[in-house]
Image: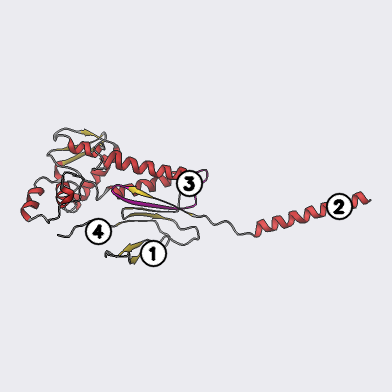
Amino acid sequence: MAKLAGWLSRYSFTLGFLALFFLWVWLRPEPVAQVYQLTGATMGTTYQVMVAGFPEGLSDAELAQGIEQRLYRLDRELMSTYAPDSELSRFNRSEPGAWFDVSPELAFVVSRAIDFSQMTDGYFDVTVGPLVDRWGFGPDQDGAMHWSRVPDQSEIESLQAQMGYQHLQTSLQPPRLLKTAPVRVDLSGIAKGYAADVIADYFADVGQVDYFIEIGGELRIQGQKPDGSPWVPAIEKPTDGSPEVWAIIDTQGESIALAGSGDYRNYFVE
């Protein structure tokens, strides 16, 4: 009887412990996912990517590697005008009049750039490279970066004669480019937005649903933060000194894409 009483006592204690344990597990709050942030440099600017939690089976290191590999390919291997061996740099050095084989990504972006040029009657023109160099904001290291004088009208007109999106043709199948005049392509006005789309597509493939992507002022936002609140991007006031917020965008949890542009971070005073 004493043995039975001792066993029952231990059994009762075990049941009581298990009951308390299960009650604690049931009552304890669910752990709140943390915001993971990745920052770096790409395409002559900076980027930041924030995600809320991770897809099952994918670590933060694997997600970061997927982002960095895609940005490196788009920048250094395909669309950079600073990297001499990028596809775009090699196309810019090629002679006019012959088709030039490129990646599907580069052919697509140049094709879309031509579409935007046509829609804006040429106000958007990716062959603007000579003017960018003359103003001192291009990749030319032979003195163009040291200009400190605004070009006069005759210089501008002379350089405009070396431009013209009408001299570009594209083929998506097979992917290739053709220039009918010695123009140079600069994708600075479209490549960063495309890169944000590429990262968003990567997230869709791996099941990442809550994210904030910003590449040089180009945004792709979806879902919400771990606490259930929406991502809230802010537009910076273009002033000298400490950064100030000009406007806040309430995404209300909706998926948005937004492109920003300005000249207050890269300029010279004559």
Residue 168 belongs to magenta span: no
Quarter of the image for the C terminus: give it.
bottom left
Give the residue at mark 4.
262
Q: Position of residue 91 (x, y in %)?
A: 20, 37
**Vertical comparison of 212 with 179: above or below:** below
User: Which numbered circle lies on residue 8?
Assistant: 2
Give the residue at mark 1.
250
First in sequence, mark 3 or 2: give its number.
Answer: 2
Distance from the alpha carbon under mark 3 to that under mark 1:
27 Å
Tag 1's secondary structure? loop
Q: Is 155 on the left or on the right of 116, as rendered?
A: left
First in sequence, mark 3 or 1: give its number.
Answer: 3
* Tag 2: amino acid: Leu
* Residue in the image at 42% along x and 47% along y: 203
Tag 3's secondary structure? helix
Q: Callout 2: 10 Å neighbours few (<14), some, many (20+)?
A: few
Q: Position of residue 38 (x, y in %)?
A: 41, 50
Q: Nearer the viewer, residue 121 or 151?
A: 151
Tell me where the magenta segment starts and ends, as one range.
42-60
User: Which numbered circle lies on residue 134?
Assistant: none
Which of labels 3 and 2 is toward the front?
Answer: 3
Q: Position of residue 4 (x, y in %)?
A: 90, 50
* Residue in the image at 37% along x and 61% along y: 233
Which of labels 1 and 4 is toward the front?
Answer: 4
First in sequence, mark 4 or 2: give its number.
Answer: 2
Give the residue at mark 3.
60
First in sequence, mark 1 or 4: give its number.
Answer: 1
Distance from the alpha carbon under mark 3 to that under mark 4:
33 Å
Which of labels 4 and 2 is toward the front?
Answer: 4
* Tag 3: amino acid: Asp
First in sequence, mark 1 or 2: give its number.
Answer: 2
Distance from the alpha carbon under mark 4 to that under mark 2:
77 Å
